[in-house]
Image: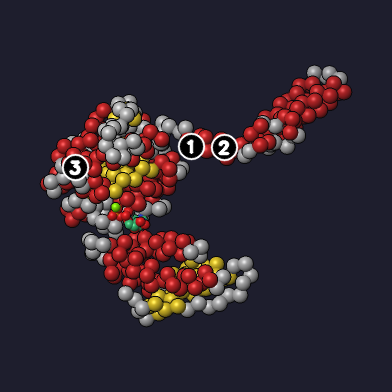
Amino acid sequence: MTGMNPWLGRLLLLLALITIDHASLPLAITLVIGAGGAAIAIFLYKGSYLPRFVMDILDRLSNKTSLEEAYEKRSQNLITIDAEDLAERVRAKVIGQDEAIKAIAQQLRRRIAAKRLDKPVAVFCLAGAPGVGKTHFAKILSEELYGARSHLHFFDMSQFGQPHAAASLFGQARGYVGSNSYGALTAALRDVPNAVVLLDEFEKAHPEVHKRFLTAWNDGFITEVSDGARVSTNEAIFVLTTNAASRRIAEIAEQTNESAEEIGRLAKAALADAQFAPEVLSRIDDVFAFRPLKGLDIARVVALEIEGIAQQFNLKIAGGGIDPQILMQAIDALSGRMQGGVRDMTRAIERQITDGLIEARGAGAAEIRLIQDGDKVSVESVRGSREQPVLNVQRAMARQ
Ligand SMILES: Nc1ncnc2c1ncn2[C@@H]1O[C@H](COP(=O)(O)OP(=O)(O)O)[C@@H](O)[C@H]1O
Ligand SMILES: [Mg+2]
């Protein structure tokens, strides 16, 4: 209806003018009715209420609105971003890393605004202990920036520990076995150039592989070896993660009185001390320190993980449905630990509840509650779906 409001104003103005001028009343009424009719016609057209002959082909044969949305996202070139809004959206999904998230969002905003044509948008490094949300953050960032998971190119760099491994990323000279296919990185960036390229645990790749990336960042393009095609990297955001120097990084991340710039500088120095390849470090725009998860943040992450596991079985957690004792145990188990962390904890809980979830699902449950039962966790159905009888599934699994 918003389209009508200016028209309404104009009509009243017209009416007032004519009345003031003492012109004929019938003329005034005719004009008003005419203009009103036009306004209604415009409204009906915009709202797609008109018959087919004046409707857009896409409205008639497809869903124009969602096509427009998808098209916009696809051709979306990041021109500016609202750093605060981005940080807020990421913070809702990445727990306990507020300082790093804020610093990354601000830095990203600057990099996007000062777009370098011959370089990637940014080359960031996220440092910190395992299981504190570095990889998770990069995934969420791509979703929040581009609105789709297809804008994330994920590479587990520990798989490229051999010098010849670069071929699977950048392609292989013709004549070799299997050389007719593109490298995974070149293919990904050719298809979706505006993306987050996540190079997970970067330090684990072979120095030969590192070297190829240095060229990619320096030149703003990569060359597909098999056919020599140039693939631009200047719309990509490279995010490296590393567990190197995680103790020192944790200390640095705790220094809340330091500025984000100073923390980044200290983190970079810590990586340098830990023998992180200096030629790589010098090409990285910024290093961000992730802190170890603590206290209730551990509980938040584990609760989110449990919700995720339940969702895989199409089950919802009832409001307040996770027994605080389960989360309390997670806090106790994880506090102060540097290794394994959330991942091990989640796996342990998953093992305990999977059978219970399967049974609850089988019994037609829609919502469940998890209860700590001695040293076991039991799954209880709260509400059934599709009017199936609600069975109380009490499956207690031995705690591993
Ligand atoms: N800060 C966090 N916020 C939300 N989830 C987290 C966080 N840290 C870890 N997780 C969860 O634990 C899992 C492992 O974390 P991950 O991001 O892979 O750790 P890292 O890359 O730092 O080693 C993730 O899949 C995520 O679901
Ligand atoms: Mg990781």
Residue 214 visible to the viewer: yes
Quarter of the picture holding the N terminus? top right
Element class at badge 3: helix
Q: Residue 183: horizontal and vertical position, in percent?
A: 32, 38
**Crowd rating for badge 2 (residues with CA inside 10 Å; few <14, some 14–19, many 20+):** few
* Ligand 1 located in image quadrant: bottom left
Name the residue type under label 3: Pro
Q: Residue 38: horizontal and vertical position, in percent?
A: 75, 27
Q: Residue at (23%, 64%) from the top-left corner?
A: 336
Q: Are marks 3 and 2 in contact (CB under 8 Å)?
A: no
Q: Quadrant of residue 278?
A: top left
Name the residue type under label 2: Leu
Q: CA distance from mark 1 to mark 3?
A: 37 Å
Looking at the picture, does residue 101 appear above or below residue 174?
below
Asked if residue 302 lies left or right of residue 6, the reply is left
Looking at the picture, does residue 217 appear above or below residue 197?
above
Element class at badge 2: helix
Which numbered disc flags the more N-terminal residue, 1 or 3? 1
Q: Nearer the viewer, residue 17 or 73?
A: 73
Q: Are marks 2 and 1 in contact (CB under 8 Å)?
A: no
Residue assigned mark 3: 163
Asked if residue 165 lies left or right of residue 93, the reply is left
Q: Residue 173: horizontal and vertical position, in percent?
A: 26, 33
Residue assigned mark 2: 67
Residue assigned mark 1: 73
Q: Nearer the viewer, residue 374 or 354?
A: 354
